[in-house]
Image: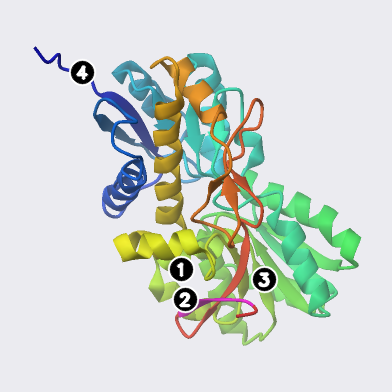
C-alpha cells in the first residue's frame, strides 16, 4: 500500500504588483527545482502566494500581514520580498517566526539568522563600481540625485564613501521622492554645480523622471546609475530615455549557465529577475534535498549546506551557496556593468 505524502509548501511574498500575477517568476522557480535529479526530493512541492502592497507606495502593515498569513499556511520557506524597504520589515519577522526566507533585494542589512539573501543588485557594492567607472572615464566631478528612501539613502551613503577612494568629487546632491514624476527643478540646480557626470541612485521609478528632466533641459551629460535601470526589462518604453546611461545589472553575456537555461526557456534567461528566480529554485531544491529534517529548521540547515553552485546570474565563474552566518547567496562577479543602447541592454566592454 502506497502512503500519500504531504506536499512541501513554499511561500511567495510579492511586495509590489506583478503584471502577470507572478506567473513568470513562479515558472522560473519551478524550472530551478526541476533541475534536481529524480529521487532527491521524495514528495511534491507546492507554492502558496501572497500579494501585498509594500513600501514605498504601500505600507509596513501590508508586508507584515502577508508574511503572517504565509506563516499560518504552514509554509516551510518563503521567497521574498524583493524591495529592500520591505526586506528590512520582513527580516525580524523571519527571525521571530523561525521561518527560513530568501529575499532578493539589494540590501545586505536585510539578512538575519533566518533571512537569507539572493543579491539582485547591492546597495553596498554597486556604488564602488560606479565610482570606479567614473574615475576610469575621467569624470571626476559628479552630481548625485538619490531616492529619499532606505534604498536611495543607503546607496548615496555608500557612494560617498567609495568615491573618496578614487578621487571623485561631489559638486552637489539632492534627495527626491522615490515616486517622483517631475524633478526638472532639482536636475536644473544640479546642472548649475557644473558636474562632469550625473549619478542616479534609487529604486528606479524616479529614474524615469530624471531622464525626462534631462531631455526637457537639453542637458547632455554622462549618466551612471545603480541597478534600478533593470526596470528597462519590464518597461521598454523607458529605455530610450536612458540611452547611453551606464548602470549595474545582474546578467552577463559570457555566463554558460545562462546560455544553457536559454535552451530550455528563452523568457527565463532574458532578464535578471527570472534568472534569479531560477537560481533560487535551485537553492530551495538543494536545501530540501540536503535537509536532515523536513522542518523549517531543517530547511535552514539545508540552505547553509549548499556550496559552490554555479550561478546563472553574474559573469562566468560566479557561484552561489550559504554557510553558518553567511547568508549572501552570490559569490564573485555577480554585478555587471551594462548600458541601454538603441533599445537594448549591452554589456560595457563587449
On the picture, is 268 further left or further right than 136? left
Task: Give the mark nearest the N terminus, 2 or 3.
Answer: 3
In three-dimensional space, the C-alpha distance between marks 2 and 3, rounded to whole angstroms, equals 14 Å
Secondary structure state at the residue bearing disc 2: helix
Do callouts 1 and 4 mark residues in contact (Cβ within 8 Å)? no
Mark 3, residues whose alpha carbon is within 10 Å: few (<14), some, or many (≥20)? many
Q: Residue at x 63, y 73 (%)?
A: 246
Q: Which residue is mark 2?
A: 239
Contact between marks 1 and 3 (CB within 8 A): the answer is: no
The secondary structure that most of the magenta stretch takes on is strand
Q: Nearer the viewer, mark 2 or mark 4?
A: 4
Percent position (x, y) of residue 39?
Answer: 29, 31
Tag 4 or tag 2, which sits nearer the N-term? 4
Residue 75 spot, x, y in % from top left: 34, 22
Q: What distance separates the C-alpha of mark 1 from that of mark 3?
A: 15 Å
* Magenta span includes 60: no
> How far, Cα to Cα, is label 2 from label 1?
6 Å
Classify 10 Å Cα crowding around label 4: few (below 14), some (14-19), many (20 and above): few
User: Which residue is painted at 61% across and 39% down in the image?
Assistant: 328
Residue at mark 1: 232
**Dot placed on the residue nearer the N-terminal end, 1 or 4:** 4
Residue segment shown in magenta = 344-348
Is 175 on the left-hand or right-hand side of 216? right
Label 3 secondary element: strand
Q: Upstream in the sequence, badge 3 or badge 4?
A: 4
Residue 105 lies, in percent from the top left, at 54, 45
Amino acid at each position: 500500500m502506497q502512503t500519500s505524502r504531504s506536499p512541501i509548501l513554499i511561500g511567495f511574498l510579492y511586495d509590489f504588483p506583478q503584471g502577470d500575477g507572478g506567473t513568470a517568476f513562479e515558472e522560473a522557480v519551478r524550472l530551478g527545482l526541476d533541475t534536481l535529479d529524480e529521487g532527491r526530493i521524495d514528495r511534491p512541492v507546492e507554492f502558496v502566494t501572497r500579494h501585498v502592497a509594500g513600501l514605498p507606495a504601500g505600507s509596513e502593515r501590508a508586508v507584515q500581514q502577508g508574511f503572517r498569513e504565509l506563516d499560518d499556511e504552514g509554509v516551510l520557506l518563503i521567497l521574498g520580498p524583493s524591495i529592500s524597504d520591505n526586506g528590512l520589515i520582513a527580516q525580524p519577522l523571519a527571525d521571530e517566526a523561525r521561518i527560513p526566507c530568501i529575499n532578493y533585494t539589494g540590501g545586505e542589512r536585510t539578512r538575519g539568522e533566518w533571512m537569507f539573501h539572493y543579491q539582485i543588485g547591492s546597495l553596498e557594492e554597486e556604488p564602488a563600481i560606479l565610482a570606479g567607472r567614473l574615475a576610469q572615464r575621467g569624470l571626476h566631478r559628479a552630481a548625485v540625485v538619490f531616492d529619499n528612501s532606505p534604498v536611495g539613502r543607503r546607496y548615496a551613503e555608500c557612494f560617498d564613501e567609495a568615491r573618496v577612494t578614487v578621487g571623485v568629487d561631489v559638486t552637489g546632491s539632492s534627495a527626491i521622492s522615490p515616486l517622483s514624476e517631475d524633478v526638472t527643478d532639482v536636475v536644473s540646480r544640479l546642472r548649475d554645480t557644473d558636474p562632469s557626470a550625473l549619478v542616479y541612485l534609487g529604486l528606479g521609478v524616479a529614474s524615469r523622471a530624471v531622464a525626462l528632466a534631462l531631455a526637457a533641459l537639453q542637458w547632455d551629460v554622462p549618466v551612471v546609475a545603480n541597478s534600478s535601470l533593470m526596470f528597462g526589462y519590464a518597461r521598454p518604453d523607458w529605455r530610450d530615455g536612458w540611452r547611453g546611461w551606464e548602470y549595474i545589472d545582474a546578467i552577463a553575456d559570457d555566463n554558460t549557465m545562462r546560455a544553457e537555461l536559454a535552451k530550455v526557456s528563452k523568457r527565463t534567461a532574458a532578464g535578471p529577475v527570472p534568472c534569479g528566480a531560477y537560481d533560487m529554485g535551485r537553492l530551495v531544491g538543494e536545501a530540501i534535498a540536503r535537509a536532515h529534517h523536513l522542518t523549517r529548521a531543517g530547511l535552514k540547515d539545508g540552505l547553509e549546506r549548499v556550496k559552490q553552485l554555479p550561478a546563472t546570474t553574474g559573469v562566468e565563474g560566479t557561484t552561489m551557496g550559504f554557510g553558518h552566518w553567511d547568508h549572501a547567496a552570490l559569490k564573485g562577479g555577480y554585478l555587471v556593468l551594462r548600458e541601454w543602447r538603441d533599445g537594448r541592454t549591452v554589456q560595457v566592454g563587449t
